[in-house]
Amino acid sequence: MSAKHLCFLKTKICLPLSPLTHLVGEKHRSGLAFLAVGMESVDHEIRQGSIGRHWRWVKSLVVKLKDKVVEVGRKAKKLGQEDPRRIVHSLKAGLAVTLVSLLYYFKPIYGGFGASTMWAILTVVVVFEFSVGATLGRGLNRGLATFTAGALGVGAHYLADLPGRKGQPILLGLFVFILAAVVSFIRFFPRVKARYDYGLLIFVLTFCLVSVSGYQDEQVLDLAHKRLITIIIGSASAVFVSICICPVWAGDDLHNLIVGNLKKLGNFLEEDFAEEYFKVSEDGEPKDNNIFFQGIGSILTSKSTEDSLTNSARWEPRHGRFRLRHPWKKYQKIGSLIRECAYHIEALKCYPCLNIQAPRGIQLQIQEACTKMSRESGKALKDLASTIKSMTKPSPINVNPHIVNSNTTAKALKLLLKTSCSENFALWEVMPTAIVAVQLVEVITCVEKIAESVHELASLARFKDADPGEEEPADGQPHHIITINGSSAVLPEECGTVIHVTNANI
């Protein structure tokens, strides 16, 4: 076939295909355009969804932040309402720091101390505490520690300088090692740690700063002098503001805390325990004891507060009704006995007293005896609380009869349990009640110890004598008082007679 025929065939074949190719191309382009539009709409929706999610996240974050601010404000309001002295303390702290920072604005003062002026501000920040005793204790600790450590640091510097420049760093390092090791060991003594732990830390810090820095700076004496003076200024400013502006005395807080715990424990024994412990629910089962035992929970957790207040109160000067060397340790001892008594009471929640298989008559006798023991112990504790609150000597007419009645009832309960066991009742039938009785006897023993400690406190603190006209019988019954020459002890009788017996020569 010739070239002319081939060209003709090619033309005939290609001409019909060109419209088809054009049609297919048009459809392909329209599909691509549709696909592009769809992709743009999907991308727009994705962008819109992403923006929406981000907006919702920002909105929820703002709401959470607002709720957090409201919660913090509510907590701050609650803190201020619980003890308004906290707000006053914050204002006092700001005032103390502001007063000391004024040293920077007086050129004559700042020129004399230079950068050491900052130690005065730092001292106020770390020394200023909530109570006067805590502030005074930290201020004295810091001042005395700085003075003694500065003197020793200067002495160590001059001793290390005697062998010459080469031996000086060796001796200084030896002095620092020995002093830091000895002071760190002394801090383990409980009494030292309770009152002087902060001073010992400042002692080591100051000694190292003065002795070691003196190796490069020859003006070591001037360094120690400036540091001591600025710390004295800071401590004095903190103590001045703490005492002169709305003072908070740790001794008053400790006194009120012990009185409150005694009264709370007395009310619990006289009212809550006596009335609720032996009650039964509607289905005849013992009530859940964990609920009303929560009333003494704060007493069991008050040890750290009492220890802190005791240590702070021992630094305080004479104020109000409290003299300079007031026996604050006795308050700590009374608080410990109160917690011991509360622990014995808390142990009773594990032993419901109603799981007794003995006859109903014996059950009622046991419950009546336990109730009387609890009420008499509670009345004795409340009388002791009133005695400490008013700082008057305990009245034997008010306190002793309750303790004697509790012991008498305890003896009667022991006899009843012994009699029940000797009859036809098995030991396991009265075992829950026997455990409760034993715990209540321990409570009575604790009440007696508390009464003895209160008498010791009244003697050491020189409480005033109770007004004879105010001494009323604790149980409301008439008492006949017979006094035979001089000071007396009290022997209450069941008939309501109180006999004051002395060492008269008869």
Image (cartoon, helix red, strand yellow):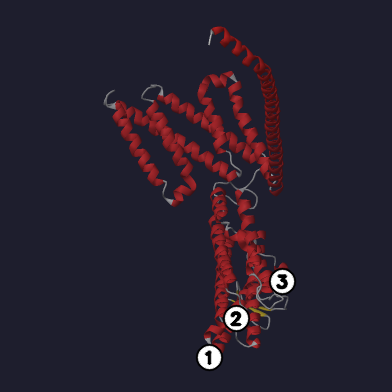
Q: Can residue 29 be seen in the rendering of this structure?
A: yes
For the residue pair 294 and 314, the one nearer the viewer reads as: 294
Q: CA distance from mark 3 to mark 1?
A: 42 Å
Up/down of 14 relative to 95, above or below:
above
Q: Position of residue 329 (x, y in %)?
A: 53, 56
* Quarter the C terminus occupies: bottom right
Q: Circle 2 — which element?
A: helix
On the image, the x and y values in percent for residue 42 come to 69, 30
Residue 37 picture quarter:
top right
Q: Which mark is residue 408?
A: 2
Identity, as a three-letter code, of the amino acid under mark 1: Ser
Find disc 1 in the rendering and name its residue.
Answer: 422
**Residue at coordinates 65% horizontally, 43% vertically from top-left?**
247
Q: CA distance from mark 2 to mark 1?
A: 21 Å
| Quadrant of the rendered image containing residue 327 | bottom right
Residue at the extreme bottom: 424
Which numbered tag is attached to residue 472? Answer: 3
Name the residue type under label 3. Glu
Q: Which residue is at a point 52% across and 21% down the rendered structure image?
A: 112
Q: Position of residue 207 (x, y in %)?
A: 40, 33
